[in-house]
Image: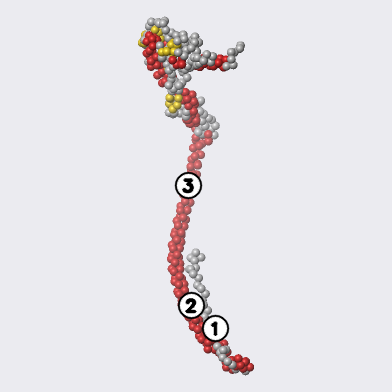
Amino acid sequence: MQWRHKEAPRCFMNRMNRQIRILQRPRPSKAVSREDFQFEKEITDFNIECPICLHVIMDDPLQSLCCGRHFCKACISGVEIDCYTRVRSCPICRGDCSDTFPDKNFERIVYSKAVYCMKKNQTQEAQCDWSGKLRDFRDHLSTTCPYDLVECKYKCSQKDILRVDLTDHLENRCMLRPYSCQHCGAKDAYKAITKSHYRVCKNYPVGCSHCSDENVRRSELNQHVKDECPMQRVECAFSWLGCKEWPLRKDAKEHYSDSHHEALSQAYRKLRDDTDELHLHTNKLRLDTNDLRFDTNELFRDVNQLKFDMNIRKIDISALYDSLNEKIYNLKVENAKLKDEMEERINRRCRDLERDLKVLKPPYDQPGFDKQFEATKEVPSTEGASDHDDMQKEEDLESDEKIQEPPPIQKGPLFSLTQ
């Protein structure tokens, strides 16, 4: 097959895509089919079905000049321009359908015709009894027709819902309707509650695998089996006496009353002997307790006496501490006085010595002193020796009169109470 030009294959694909889009175009908000109603008197002058969407033309009918067919405004407006002729191609005659006009005569004649609603229930046993003009039929389908198909407001998967059954569907049959668990009050969609939640609901009644009770809560099943289930085997209450049987809980009383009289007698005798021994042991413990109570009281009295003696000692130590502090203070005062007196005596003695030194100082600056000094060296003088002896005696006297200064007194208490 040869194409007229290189764009021919692409134009062919565009045409095919256009036809697919026309077929897949969504229906109007409420499309009307020819099978939904019946004219009171059939009309043959007009073809009331759109050749594109195949529904009854209910809005803005347009007539094409090329072939005279009527189309829906939305359908004819969606026809694309042909890639060969560069015009809008009519889907009926392939002519130019760019020129269309509203057909008021179609609206006046067709929409005023009387029709009967042909909607029926699913069993075809009941039919809608509405009748009226065609222009009002779509409103009837959208609002009041009991046998028209409607959508579930919860968006469930069921599509064949009649308006007359919608209320029952929303309340009782819709799998996505709001639903509350009857056992714990959890809220979710009906499908989620019944399919998933009931499998884990703690208050959901489950059957006991041992007995016939079917109303045991899931959270209480283990407790039921452990403490209540009549078909559960339990350990004999006299197993401590040697009974190794495990009767059913419902047969436990009969088991206890049949075969345990001798065992009970032996248990009673053993308990009586144990009770007597326990009384003796209790009396001995009571006597030991009294002795311990007496010893404890003695210890308490000794402790109280020690506390009293300790308080007396504390008072005596405190008085002694105050007395020692007072004596230390007096010694410090006397020491300070002695120090002042010694300083005064030393200063006075120093002044006397300085005065004597001035008197005994030789006149080195007088003329002829050198010759006299040399003469004194050659001839020892008794006066000089006597003077020297006097000075030595004075120094010995000063050394004897010198009083040693007492060592400094350490500050703080004489001793610590903690020693």
Instruction: Name the residue type under label 2.
Output: Lys
Instruction: Name the residue type under label 1.
Output: Ser
Residue 254 shows up from this direction: no
Q: Judge whether 261 appears above or below 37 on screen.
A: below
Labels 1, 3: front one: 1
Instruction: Name the residue type under label 3.
Output: Thr
Task: Provide the secondary structure element on which disc 2 rests.
Answer: helix
Crowding at mark 1 (Cα within 10 Å: few <14, some 14-19, many 20+): few
Q: CA distance from mark 1 to mark 3?
A: 93 Å
Q: Which quadrant holds residue 35?
A: top left
CB under 8 Å between callouts 3 and 2? Answer: no
The picture places residue 124, in percent across and down from the top left corner, at 43, 9
Image disc number at residue 282: 3
Q: Most extreme residue toward the right, as rendered?
A: 378
Image disc number at residue 399: 1
User: Which residue sits at x=54%, y=89%?
Assistant: 360
Residue 3 shows up from this direction: yes
CB under 8 Å between callouts 1 and 3? Answer: no
Crowding at mark 2 (Cα within 10 Å: few <14, some 14-19, many 20+): few
